[in-house]
Amino acid sequence: MNRVLIAIDYNPSSQEVAEAGHKLAKLMDAEVCLLHVMSDAAHYGMRYPTFMGYEGYSVGTFDANMVQEMYSISEDYLKSAANHLNDTKVSTHLTEGDASRAILDYADEWNADLIVMGTHSHSKLEKLLMGTIASSVLEKTRIPVYMVPIKKEH
């Protein structure tokens, strides 16, 4: 396996997914790409503590109607996530649309040998959405998927 695509969402659990995927890729001496699929603008308004070196943004400066602002926020998040892995060879890719379709399409375009993603996120809504995304990717993929189980902290 030469290319590992790590799909991360905008959630602190992505740190665990990115680190586990990167560690696996390094064991295989594989190239790594962090992929983020932009979703609903409101999701980026979630106020989490700093994770993967990303501190978020000021809620007052975010205009949900400005797609460019979403891209800028998402690019900043991806850059912080890549820097967190402390590996200058990690590339990033930002796309938008249906998450499972976007993950599968980019895995095909990038010629990924493995997709890494988390099994679910923390909130009930995010858990439902990520569960659906993970299930859809598993159902439709032509390449192996490495699932990182994310447990809700008590």
Image: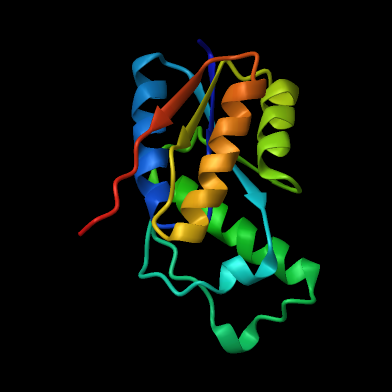
Instruction: Left or right? Give the position of 32 relative to 17.
Output: right
Can the viewer see residue 90?
Answer: yes
Q: In the visual, does 145 lie left or right of 140?
A: left
Q: Is residue 27 above or below residue 42?
A: above
The image quadrant that residue 47 belongs to is: bottom left
Residue found 54% across the figure and 58% down from its top: 77
Q: Is residue 136 above or below residue 16?
A: above
Q: Who's the residue at 72% across and 21% down the image?
A: 108
Q: Position of residue 89 (x, y in %)?
A: 50, 32
Quadrant of residue 34 within the rendered picture: top right
Coloring basis for residues? rainbow
Q: Looking at the picture, tell me which residue is in the foreground, 20 or 89.
A: 20
What is the residue that sits farthest to the bottom in this orientation? 60
Residue 91 visible in the shown view: no
- Please provide percent x and percent y for residue 151: 29, 46
Q: Nearer the viewer, residue 123 or 12?
A: 123
Q: Position of residue 26 (x, y in %)?
A: 37, 22
| Residue occupying image coordinates x 45% and y 59% | 124
Q: Relative to 134, is 129 above or below?
A: below
Q: Position of residue 98 (x, y in %)?
A: 73, 45
